[in-house]
Structure formats: structure tokens, C-alpha cells
Image (cartoon, grey):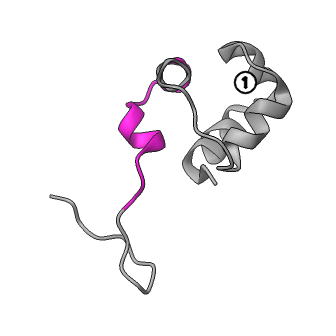
């Protein structure tokens, strides 16, 4: 699941249907992508990143975690 994207979308008050329309896909296709069943295309990622004023890596790249689920420092 795209948890960062889900959080950003909710915080912005956007529905899945609204974000799907912004990136030019059906609500069903968007839902499958947000749930992680299918991947976002790079063009869709750029549009979403622009909508939320974030870098693609902040939204779509997985966060490194330990086996206990704590985030590791990347730098």
C-alpha cells in the first residue's frame, strides 16, 4: 500500500476519484495503484508529486526499516 500517498491525499481532502481524475485514470485503476496491486507510471508519479509539492522519492520510494519496523537513518 502507498501509505505516504494515502496520508497526503487524506490530508489534502482529496478522494481517490478526484486524484484519479487529476492524473487521467479511472477511480478503479487509481485504487489498485494506491493499494499496491499495480504500479504507478512515471508520468503519474510526477503529476502526483507536483500536486502535493513533494519529490517523487518522498512519496513513492520505500522507507528502509529494520525487522522491528523502526525507520533507519539514511544519511
Horizontally, is 10 left or right of 72 in the view?
A: right
Vertical side of 74 occupied by 55: above or below: above
Query: Residue at position x 47%, y 20% from top?
Result: 46
Q: Residue furthest bottom?
A: 68
Horizontally, is 58 left or right of 33 in the view?
A: left
The quadrant of the rendering that contains the N terminus is bottom right
Front position in the image: 12 or 48: 48
Q: Check disc 1 and report its element: helix, strand or loop.
A: helix
Vertical side of 30 occupied by 46: above or below: above
The stretch drawn in magenta includes residue 62: yes
Read off the magenta span. Answer: 47-63
Q: Residue furthest left?
A: 75
Vertical side of 34 occupied by 53: above or below: above
Q: Residue furthest front?
A: 38
Tag 1: Cα neighbours inside 10 Å, few (<14), some, or many (≥20)? some
Question: Is there any visible trace of residue 15 in the rendered image?
Answer: no
Question: Is there any visible trace of residue 2 in the rendered image?
Answer: yes
The stretch drawn in magenta includes residue 49: yes
Query: Residue at position x 58%, y 39% from top?
Result: 39
| Residue 27: percent from left, percent from top | 83, 28
Horizontally, is 28 left or right of 52 in the view?
A: right
**Which residue is tagged 1?**
19
| Residue 23: percent from left, percent from top | 66, 16
The quadrant of the rendering that contains the C terminus is bottom left
Query: Residue at position x 40%, y 47% from top?
Result: 61
Marker count (numbered): 1
Query: Residue at position x 47%, y 41% from top?
Result: 59
| Residue 12: percent from left, percent from top | 68, 32
| Residue 29: percent from left, percent from top | 77, 31
**Image quarter for residue 32?**
top right
Front position in the image: 42 or 63: 42
Amino acid at each position: 500500500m502507498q501509505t505516504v500517498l494515502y496520508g497526503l491525499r487524506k490530508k489534502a481532502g482529496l478522494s481517490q476519484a478526484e486524484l484519479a481524475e487529476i492524473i487521467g485514470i479511472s477511480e478503479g485503476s487509481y485504487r489498485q495503484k494506491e493499494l499496491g496491486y499495480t504500479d504507478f507510471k512515471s508520468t503519474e508519479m510526477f503529476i502526483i508529486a507536483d500536486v502535493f509539492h513533494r519529490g517523487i522519492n518522498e512519496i513513492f520510494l520505500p522507507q528502509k526499516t529494520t525487522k522491528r519496523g523502526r525507520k533507519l537513518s539514511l544519511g
